[in-house]
Image (cartoon, rainbow, N blue to C red):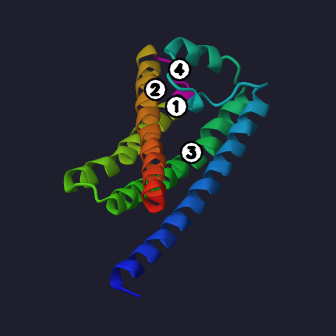
């Protein structure tokens, strides 16, 4: 085997491991989110709502009881912090791999893999703000910060997903041609 083929094979194996960790963390996060819903009479996790307004946050908070708020704050938030690291690692490596295989220019190959990092940073900030909110900080500006971090997270994470899927489709098309 040539050196490039070995490197690509090992790269795909590593990417497969990152995908498995990402999917396992996603399943664990969904499980924790469903538990929050059960404990709060159907009120889901606020983090998973794109662009929720400060009024929407206030409305959702009224549906949490002490037990569901504590579970959300300690269990769900802990899982969500690790989940952010898992999806960032997978998306960053997958974007890098796809761009390399497509022969993208250096600048593109340098900048696009930063998208999931920005998404993860926004997610971690969103989680920190939600932890404060669930701890009793009920200030309108804090709700507005949550909304901003929430939208940034979704835009950058879903942009990362779109690049990975689009790149994979381009690679498939390239192989079939």
Which residue is tagged 2? 146
Crowd around label 4: few <14 · some 14–19 · many ≥20 (10 Å): some
Q: Earlier in the sequence, mark 3 or mark 4?
A: 4
Judged left or right of residue 34, residue 5 is left
Q: Earlier in the sequence, mark 3 or mark 2?
A: 3
Q: Is residue 30 above or below residue 146?
A: below
Quadrant position of residue 39 = top right
Label 2 residue SS? helix
Image: magenta residue range: 132-139
Residue 68's disc number: none
Q: Position of residue 150 (x, y in %)?
A: 46, 29
- Distance in Å between CA atoms under marks 2 and 1: 7 Å
> Which of 104/141 is in front?
104
Which residue is tagged 1? 130
Q: Earlier in the sequence, mark 1 or mark 3?
A: 3
Q: Nearer the viewer, mark 2 or mark 1?
A: 2
Q: Earlier in the sequence, mark 4 or mark 1?
A: 4
Q: Nearer the viewer, mark 3 or mark 4?
A: 4
> Which of 58/119 is in front?
119
Q: Main secondary structure of the magenta part?
A: loop
Q: Are marks 1 and 3 in contact (CB under 8 Å)?
A: no
Label 3 residue SS? helix
- Distance in Å between CA atoms under marks 2 and 4: 9 Å
At 46% across and 54% down in the image, what residue appears?
A: 173
Crowd around label 3: few <14 · some 14–19 · many ≥20 (10 Å): many
Q: Are marks 2 and 4 in contact (CB under 8 Å)?
A: yes
Residue 52's disc number: 4
Q: Are marks 4 and 1 in contact (CB under 8 Å)?
A: no
């Amino acid at each position: 085997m040539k050196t490039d083929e070995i490197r690509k094979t090992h790269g795909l194996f590593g990417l497969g491991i990152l995908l498995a960790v990402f999917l396992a963390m996603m399943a664990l996060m969904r499980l924790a989110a469903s538990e929050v819903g059960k404990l709060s009479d159907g009120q889901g996790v606020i983090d998973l709502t794109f662009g929720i307004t400060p009024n929407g946050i206030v409305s959702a908070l009224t549906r949490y009881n002490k037990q569901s708020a504590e579970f959300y704050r300690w269990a769900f938030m802990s899982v969500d912090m690790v989940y952010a690291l898992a999806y960032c690692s997978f998306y960053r490596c997958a974007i890098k791999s796809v761009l390399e295989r497509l022969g993208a220019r250096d600048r593109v190959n340098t900048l696009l893999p930063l998208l999931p990092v920005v998404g993860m940073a926004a997610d971690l900030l969103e989680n920190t703000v939600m932890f404060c909110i669930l701890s009793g900080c009920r200030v309108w500006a804090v709700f507005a910060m949550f909304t901003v971090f929430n939208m940034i997270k979704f835009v950058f994470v879903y942009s990362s997903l779109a690049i990975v899927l689009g790149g994979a489709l381009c690679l498939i098309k390239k192989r079939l041609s």
